[in-house]
Amino acid sequence: MTGAGRGRDAAAAGRPRWSPLRRRDDEPPAWTRALADGEDAGYFGPGSAVWAVNGALPTLVAGIRALLLQTLHPGAMAGVHDHSRYREDPLGRLDGTVRWVATTTFGDRRAAAAACASVSRRHERVTGTYVDARGEVRPYAANDEDLLRWVHDAFTEAFIGAHERWGGPIPGGPDAYVREWAETGRLMGVREPPTTLAALRAELDAFLAEARPDERVAEAVRFLRRPGLPGVVGRLYPILFGGAVASLGARERTLLGLRRPWWPAITLTRAVLAIGVRRFGRMSPSEQNARARLARLARASESASRPRTAGGARAQPRRS
């Protein structure tokens, strides 16, 4: 449920949105450029597992995979069904989610905390009821820790699963990613999120034991299969969707009412992502701006550490 509403705000203000098929010379959204601001390195940084995974192009598939997984919690699905405008504005929802991921990944600590607080405030109105696996009517609220934990776990597993198939090495391995990304779960209000891949998958198994797919899940899956995206994005999307479905486990596909594509979805997705790397490069504008912030902070720290001359000016480094 993360990110709903932000894309609509950007569109209304005439600001550029994030696009999965941006060109190198496209003006990035203002929130991307703002990642160059800030007063610290953030929660992660170069060489972290989170930067390696969240900054790589397989996130295009991971996002679809995460949304498919998240539909399997009846409370989360009820919240999306009852409160989200994803059908009317799929790119707006995507823009908001990408903004949250990029800010928490590459922003400084204040920006990351503010992004999570903004999502929590929007979630305050997302309440209602759903029918659980036992047929009992239960209340839900998007800020309930149970739902926050499910969304966090599904997101984490989806991004790990996509990166293992289409990404490069993860510094420290998957456990490092789960452990590092747990910090964002805490910012969202999840107490003691899993910090190992085994613990993460154990929690997901427990959640899935309570899964109760219904017509709302089927409706969401139908939409995710054909969201009606425009242009080249719409023509390539079925390949990425097929890759996301193929990367899921058999249990999840069964619960979602999906079958593994008969065509080589994993291989074709790899080809599409390789084309994307050649077109856009390996480093996103978000990471570029984060690195610019780190370089600025390093220069300021170096300047502050230089001894002062008798006149009070900073001594300049000696050149050989």
Image: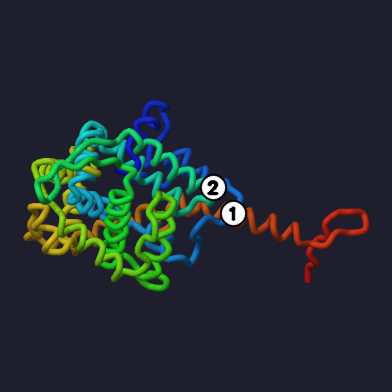
Estimate the x, y position of residue 290 in percent, counting from the top left.
52, 53
Residue at (29% x, 71% y) in the render: 198
Q: Which residue is mark 2?
A: 110
Would you identify the image quadrant in which residue 313 lies? bottom right
Indicate the secondary structure of the residue bearing disc 2. helix
Q: Are marks 1 and 2 in contact (CB under 8 Å)?
A: yes
**Mark 1 residue type:** Asp
Q: Which residue is mark 1?
A: 40
> 224 or 243: nearer the eye?
224
Residue at (42% x, 27% y) in the render: 13
For the residue carrying disc 1, how many other residues have a C-alpha within 10 Å: few (<14), some (14-19), or many (20+)?
Answer: some
The correct choice, above or below, for 121 with respect to 163 in the image is: above
Quarter of the N terminus within the rendering: top left
Indicate the secondary structure of the residue bearing disc 1. loop
Is tag 1's residue or tag 2's residue first in the polypeptide sequence?
Answer: 1
**Mark 2 residue type:** Arg
Q: Say if residue 19 shows up in the picture.
A: no
The correct choice, above or below, for 102 with respect to 137 in the image is: below
